[in-house]
Image (spheres, helix red, strand yellow):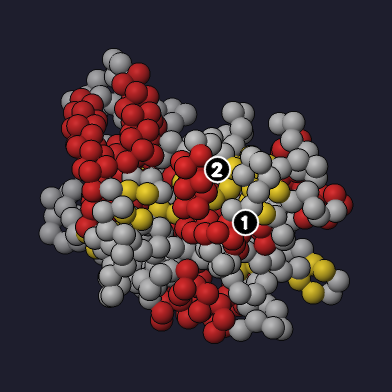
């Protein structure tokens, strides 16, 4: 057993912010499934939204967020996050992060749904630049221990131990290099595990986005909310050799337009904001045009801009497309929507506390009330910063429950798996029917079909889990099937079309916006 003051599961921006904001005397463990850089934060291209320009205001940023959220944002949360943004950016820069300038001022881009330029960025690889800086700082801190190639199996709760109470005491963690299950005891545990993109066949997310935190929190007795709101990014590079490569929304902010194969624009016919409409609007428009015309993709065109401008603003996209034989200074980019961001998740308060004692959740795995029915572009990294710092401040002054002895992981009644190919088959089946039935546009019948198939998979996986030793793939599949079930249950309860949830059977929007909350 290893004992720490704080156990952080995940290594993205929210996890790194939390670790670096905690007092230096606290012993912190950061557990991550692969390398510490394997996170959605690291892949983020666009930037961080914050009021930095002279023509901008907190009220403008709040209003844009509320409009994108389609009436479901918690306005008090939105204002708190927006007004805390400049201080969070200052803290980030104090850690060594840098952003692009235009002369003496920051170069601010504009993305869909924003009325002003307010997105700070580091070229078109903001997440990587920020994460490289913070991970280096974290590795240098004497009180933080990184555990790469470790995947959390489950939280250790009072209920699991047969005790009275509702506290979390740490987690059982599989060391994937040795196959050993370790016991991590901690005064406080934070889930910073990202979203659920890998539940869908096409996604911009890394392979690590398997809903682990949501599933573990649910099994620990925590509420989840608004999981029907899965944001599909409108412009994922469509190419057989381009796995999960995102074309940043900032490109449309800098003048790129969407075109059909014949070169004609179509976004003005769908929304007066055209390419700068919120992501849900653009994704549905692309989906409509592709289905109407039988297309595999549409095209994003920035060739009317000078080549020097394109290469300087989007160097990573330019380089990656060139590798695939596409010169974006002269050719249009083939794009299609893909699952991108989970707007719902574990219910938390303003300090990131979940329903179980000693348990916090931060970042994409949560439902804070900031995003509502559709996240405004570049508010996600901002949320990671704000809630990572808030959780650290609360942990620093809170008193955890007393330490108790924790039992080792019990493998006495399991054997080695005999047919691991079953896991791969089940994984592919799940991702395919989630894409077909729980995608950009849904129907009641499609959701019922998805629920039926999830039930069959869940029963099969639970039997497998009960009889065989755990593996990395089995843990992820178990979590993903549970999270998919929660997504479908939330979607079935929403009898309207709002934000990212579009239903052919319920095309109108109800007069009152209500959260979809599930209780274990």
Closest to the observer, 173 or 374: 374
- The local crowd at label 1, few if under 14, some if 14 to 19, many if 20 or more residues have their Cα within 10 Å, is many
Left or right, 149 with reference to 254 = left
Q: Could you tell me which quadrant the N terminus lies in?
A: top left
Q: Is residue 492 visible?
A: yes
Left or right, 106 with reference to 386 = right
Q: Residue at x 47, y 29 (%)?
A: 177
In the rendered image, residue 39, in percent from the top left (x then y), is placed at 53, 47
Q: Earlier in the sequence, mark 2 or mark 1?
A: 1
Closest to the observer, 28 or 111: 111
The secondary element bearing badge 1 is classed as loop
Q: Nearer the viewer, mark 2 or mark 1?
A: 2
Closest to the observer, 123 or 231: 231
- The local crowd at label 2, few if under 14, some if 14 to 19, many if 20 or more residues have their Cα within 10 Å, is many
In the rendered image, residue 251, in percent from the top left (x then y), is placed at 69, 55
Q: Residue at x 36, y 71 (%)?
A: 72
Left or right, 450 with reference to 73 = left
In the rendered image, residue 308, in percent from the top left (x then y), is placed at 87, 52
Q: Is residue 134 above or below residue 51?
A: above
Q: Residue at x 38, y 45 (%)?
A: 439
In the rendered image, residue 412, in percent from the top left (x then y), is placed at 20, 27
The secondary element bearing badge 2 is classed as strand
Q: Is residue 33 visible?
A: no
- According to the picture, the residue beneath numbered tag 1 turns out to be 249
Q: Could you tell me which quadrant the C terminus lies in?
A: bottom left
Number of numbered callouts drawn: 2
Quarter holding residue 345: bottom left
Q: Residue furthest top?
A: 418
- According to the picture, the residue beneath numbered tag 2 turns out to be 336
Closest to the observer, 490 or 36: 490
Q: Residue at x 64, y 40 (%)?
A: 261
């Amino acid at each position: 057993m290893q004992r720490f003051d704080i156990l952080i599961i995940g290594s993205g921006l929210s996890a790194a912010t939390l670790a670096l904001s905690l007092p230096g005397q606290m012993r912190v463990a950061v557990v991550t499934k692969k390398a510490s850089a394997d996170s959605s934060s690291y892949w983020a291209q666009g930037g961080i939204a914050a009021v930095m320009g002279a023509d901008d205001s907190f009220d403008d940023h709040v209003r844009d967020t509320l409009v994108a959220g389609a009436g479901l944002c918690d306005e008090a949360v939105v204002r708190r996050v927006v007004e805390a943004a400049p201080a969070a950016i200052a803290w980030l820069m104090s850690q060594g992060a840098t952003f692009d300038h235009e002369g003496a001022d920051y170069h601010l881009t504009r993305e869909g749904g924003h009325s002003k330029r307010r997105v700070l960025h580091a070229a078109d690889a903001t997440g990587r630049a920020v994460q490289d800086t913070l991970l280096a700082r974290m590795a240098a801190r004497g009180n933080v221990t990184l555990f790469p190639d470790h995947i959390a199996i489950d939280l250790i709760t009072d209920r699991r131990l047969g005790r009275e109470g509702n506290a979390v005491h740490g987690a059982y963690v599989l060391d994937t290099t040795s196959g050993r299950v370790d016991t991590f005891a901690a005064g406080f545990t934070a889930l910073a595990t990202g979203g659920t993109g890998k539940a869908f066949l096409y996604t911009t997310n890394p392979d690590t986005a398997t809903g682990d935190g949501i599933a573990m929190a649910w099994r620990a007795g925590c509420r989840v909310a608004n999981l029907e709101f899965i944001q599909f990014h409108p412009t994922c590079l469509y190419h057989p050799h381009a796995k999960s490569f995102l074309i940043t929304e900032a490109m449309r902010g800098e003048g790129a337009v969407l075109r059909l194969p014949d070169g004609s624009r179509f976004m003005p016919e769908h929304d007066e904001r055209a390419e700068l409409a919120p992501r849900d609007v653009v994704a549905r428009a692309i989906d409509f045009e592709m289905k109407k015309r039988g297309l595999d993709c549409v095209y994003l065109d920035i060739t009317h801009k000078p080549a020097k401008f394109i290469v300087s603003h989007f160097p990573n996209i330019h380089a990656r497309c060139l590798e695939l034989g596409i010169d974006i200074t002269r050719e249009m980019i083939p794009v299609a929507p893909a699952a991108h961001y989970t707007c719902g998740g574990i219910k938390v308060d303003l300090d990131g506390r979940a329903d179980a004692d000693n348990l916090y959740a931060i970042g994409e795995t949560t439902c804070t009330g900031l995003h509502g029915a559709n996240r405004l572009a570049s508010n996600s990294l901002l949320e990671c910063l704000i809630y990572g710092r808030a959780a650290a401040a609360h942990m620093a002054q809170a008193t955890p429950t007393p330490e108790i002895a924790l039992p080792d992981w019990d493998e006495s009644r399991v054997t080695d798996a005999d047919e691991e190919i079953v896991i791969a088959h089940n994984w592919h089946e799940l991702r395919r029917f989630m894409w077909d039935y729980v995608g950009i546009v849904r129907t009641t019948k499609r959701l019922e079909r998805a629920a039926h198939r999830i039930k069959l998979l869940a029963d099969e996986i639970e039997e497998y889990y009960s009889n065989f030793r755990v593996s990395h793939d089995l843990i992820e599949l178990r979590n993903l099937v549970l999270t998919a079930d929660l997504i479908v249950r939330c979607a079935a309860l929403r009898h309207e079309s709002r934000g990212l949830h579009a239903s052919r059977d319920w095309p109108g929007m109800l007069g009152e916006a209500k959260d979809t909350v599930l209780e274990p």
